[in-house]
Image (cartoon, grey):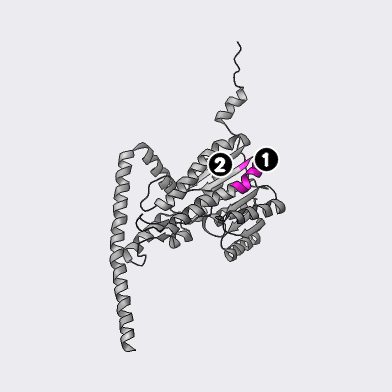
Amino acid sequence: MALNLPSLETVRGLFFMKTPVPSFRGRKVLITGAASGIGKATAEIVAKQGGELVLTDLQADVLDATVNEITGNGGTVLYHQAGDVSDFDWVQSFARAVDAEVGVMDVVMNVAGVSAWGTVENLQHKQWKLMVDVNLMGPIHIIESFVPQMVRRGQGGQLVNVSSAAGLLALPWHAAYSASKFGIRGVSEVLRYDLRRHNIGVSLVCPGGVATPLVNTVDIVGLDRDNPVVEKQVNGFHKIAVTPEKAGEAICKGVLKNKFMVYTSFDTRFGYWWERKFALPYEVVMRIANNRFNQLYELSQVSLAQKEADQAAVEKTGSAKH
């Protein structure tokens, strides 16, 4: 009986995949969270390399300013609209408008995200829900609304999902944030294989520290950010954080080389390698880091209590004068 052996082309396909997007020139690129930080930096790089942009962000005024800046520098923005990626109805409406005005995307980049840290006894339900709604369901809404068209067109493309170091490592106080970032990592791992037969590559971006506005606005539940010790720790983060431009360059290089794992700095790459190769030392380091966070929390509680006492004294003095 003759054996039906797979063809050489089929075997090659198991090991090699032609880069779907070898250049941004003339390619239609959707970027969420495009008004600032990594999203804006990536949009600027894509525009300089000849990409044609479709941009969205929650902040309308800042998005308009970004669009004006890009077009003023000779870049092309085909369409832009402010909106909330966690709102599925809005994303569907946005996608219909993009389909009608622009057509099918060549590259879809999920960059928009928010962050909140805290221990389980301090995190509120609204913070857990916000992380999942924006960081996980937001990208899923975009994938649902834009990737099927790429599949049907049959010309390939690239999907980019921004996770985080917290999507690879068990960082202290990151349970809610990691729920979303580990989630989008899982989605990306599956789609990496599901979309391969359609010549659509998938890139999972795992930034470490990036000096974006998110650093100063992140909700750290239970910490007094005005406390000098806490402020020093935050400033220390700034010292090791890479610029949004460097992160954007890493993302663009990852797309053009069809890389799955995209790191924006060495620390995340090393930490992920360390976790997989040296499980017990990794656990010890995480325990030490967690203890450090707890010390900051205890210190913050003292300073917050003092602030409340000072405020109460001021209010009491004011009442006495009246």
Identity, as a three-letter code, of the amino acid under mark 1: Arg
The answer to whether one can see residue 257 in this image is no
Estimate the x, y position of residue 238 in percent, counting from the top left.
41, 58
Instruction: Say which mark, if any, is on residue 286.
Output: none
Q: Which residues are magenta?
A: 144-157
Estimate the x, y position of residue 218 in percent, counting from the top left.
43, 60
Can you tell which quarter of the image residue 169 is in? top left
Front residue of 146/226: it is 146
Establish if 76 lies above or below 275. below
Rendered residue at 48%/44% (across/down): 185
Magenta stretch, main secondary structure, is helix
> Is residue 67 found inside the magenta-colored segment of the image?
no
| Quadrant location of the N terminus in the rendered image | top right
Instruction: Say which mark, if any, is on residue 152.
Output: 1
Rendered residue at 65%/55% (across/down): 93
Rendered residue at 57%/64% (across/down): 62
Q: Residues within 10 Å of mark 2 (few under 14, many from 20)?
A: many
Q: Is residue 134 left or right of residue 8?
A: left
Can you tell which quarter of the image residue 280 is in? top left
Which type of secondary structure does the marked residue at label 2 adopt?
strand
Identity, as a three-letter code, of the amino acid under mark 2: Val
> Is residue 151 found inside the magenta-colored segment of the image?
yes
Estimate the x, y position of residue 232 in percent, counting from the top left.
34, 62
Q: Is residue 233 left or right of residue 20?
A: left
Residue position for label 2? 202
Front residue of 65/192: it is 192
Q: Is residue 80 left or right of residue 212?
A: right
Label 2 vs label 1: CA separation?
A: 17 Å
**Residue projecting furthest to the bottom:** 322
The answer to whether one can see residue 95 in this image is yes
